[in-house]
Image (tube, helix red, strand yellow):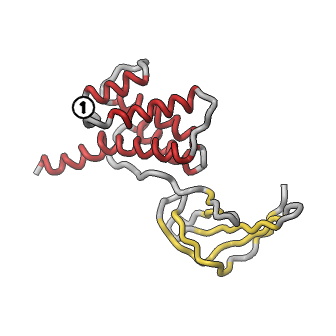
Amino acid sequence: MNKIDWRQIGTVNSKAFDCGYCGNSLASDKAYTGTRNDVRTIHTLYIYICHHCHQPTFFDEFGNQTPQKTFGRVIPNITDTSIKTLYEEARSSYAASAYTASTMCCRKLLMNIAVSKGAEENKSFQYYVDYLAEKNFIPNGTKDWVDAIRTKGNDATHEIALSSQEEAEEILGFTEMLLRLIYEFPSKALKYKKS
């Protein structure tokens, strides 16, 4: 493994990015810079420190960020700890470029959500999608994209093909919307019902 020679903090071209730890957007012109010598090439690396959470974010000379921005947003009012944990695990997997793992977590979320809403355990994943639709936890016309979470997650679990970044983003986006429909919006509506 090649040694990286890190230099003291200095001024560099300003870099705008979303922190992979806290999700905040920032721009900084202060970074640690380092060089790594391969046999024929010198690689320049950068470490920027987030102004909000003070965690380091690494960039290579091609602009690849580690950790990546976490995809999706935090969903408030998820009362079931296992569902909240699985969703954050799916988001963290995405940020670590583990797109297949992220997709598999979303598939598992379907089962956990349905069971938390009264479905029987140890049933097929199609049963859980149907349950959510039949019990009106998902609106008419959305069953297809909820079923996409199941089918893509099933492919990630049982097929050799890996999930792409684009597929993981779509599945996480579908999962986020499902969680918002089932947990966030009903809890927001309660404050209006009480008044």
User: Dividing the picture into quarters, in which one does residue 120 lie?
Assistant: top left
In this picture, residue 71 sits left or right of residue 56: left
Residue 122 appears at what percent x and percent y? 43, 18
- Tell me what residue is drawn at x 47 percent, y 45 percent: 88
Q: Secondary structure at mark 1?
A: loop
Q: Amino acid at mark 1?
A: Asn
Residue located farthest toward the left when viewing the structure as drawn? 195
> Does 173 appear above or below 24?
above
Residue 64 appears at what percent x and percent y? 64, 60
Residue located farthest toward the right when viewing the structure as drawn? 39
User: Dividing the picture into quarters, in which one does residue 181 lie?
Assistant: top left
Residue 187 appears at what percent x and percent y? 25, 45
For label 1, the crowd category at 10 Å Cα-Cα, with few meaning under 14, some 14 to 19 and many 20 or more, is: few
User: Dividing the picture into quarters, in which one does residue 149 lie?
Assistant: top left
Picture mark count: 1
- Tell me what residue is drawn at x 85 percent, y 61 percent: 38
State the residue in front, 191 or 2.
2
- Tell me what residue is drawn at x 53 percent, y 57 percent: 69
Residue located farthest toward the bottom when viewing the structure as drawn? 11
Residue 32 appears at what percent x and percent y? 69, 72
- Tell me what residue is drawn at x 69 percent, y 63 percent: 60
Instruction: Find disc 1 in the rendering and name its residue.
Output: 136
> Does 119 appear above or below 90?
above
Q: Quadrant of the N terminus?
A: bottom right
